[in-house]
Amino acid sequence: MTVVSNLRKTIIILITFSFGLISCESEKKYSDFNETDFYEVQGIINYANQTSDPFDSSTEKNVSFTYFLDRPNPKTGIEKNLEMFEAQKGYPLIVLVHKNDESISFYGRVGILENINDKEKEFLNKHFQNEMNKTKENTPDYIYNALIKDTIEENITDKK
């Protein structure tokens, strides 16, 4: 009797374990979708940290970003193990958002969309001004003044 009882327990444990493994879903990747399933929105990088694996390339990062900057409650996305040299905290980026589910998003590319709305412009202006203020606080005046001297308006190479 105990052999049959132990066998039943073992079978029940194996079946339960099998269902547990089957029900686990892996994270969706951009390649799991069609390119036409997405639209672009403006976002900003919250952090871009190197992965914890010491054998990964220095450009392989875990990236967190915020998008829908014009909303009272913007959304946050995370992508792991991205090969992104240019991903840095505070950089603006273009986020790919799924047309049917706004919670599905992917890192698109660093940059600013051409058609951002006024609230997004205001958010980015405030963000960049805060970054400039931090830089000014942490930089001696003579270096900071040299950095901001060569602006687009003053750049002689742009004049024709």
Image: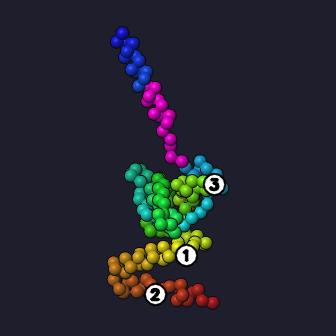
Magenta: main secondary structure equals: helix
The residue lying at 52 percent from left, 89 percent from top is 154
Instruction: Give the residue furthest to the right.
Output: 36
The answer, for residue 85, to whether it is visible in the render is no
The answer, for residue 67, to whether it is visible in the render is yes
Query: Disc 1 or 3, which lies upstream in sequence?
Result: 3
The residue lying at 43 percent from left, 66 percent from top is 89
Q: How many marks?
A: 3
| Residue 95, picture quadrant | bottom right
- Specify whether residue 17 is painted magenta: yes
Is mark 1 in CB contact (under 8 Å) with mark 2?
Answer: no
Give above or below for 18 relative to 156.
above
Amino acid type, callout 1 = Asp
Q: Point out which mark residue 118 bears.
A: 1
Secondary structure beneath dot 3 equals helix
Q: CA distance from mark 1 to mark 2?
A: 28 Å
**Which residues, given as a range, are shown in magenta?**
14-28
Q: Is residue 49 left or right of residue 103?
A: left
Residue 119 position in % (x across, y down): 52, 73
Residue linked to disc 2:
149
Please say which color scheme the image uses: rainbow
In this rendering, which labeled residue sits more in front, label 1 or label 3?
Answer: 1
| Residue 140, picture quadrant | bottom left
In this rendering, which labeled residue sits more in front, label 1 or label 2?
Answer: 1
Amino acid type, callout 2 = Lys
Residue linked to disc 3:
37
The residue lying at 47 percent from left, 34 percent from top is 21
- Specify whether residue 12 is painted magenta: no
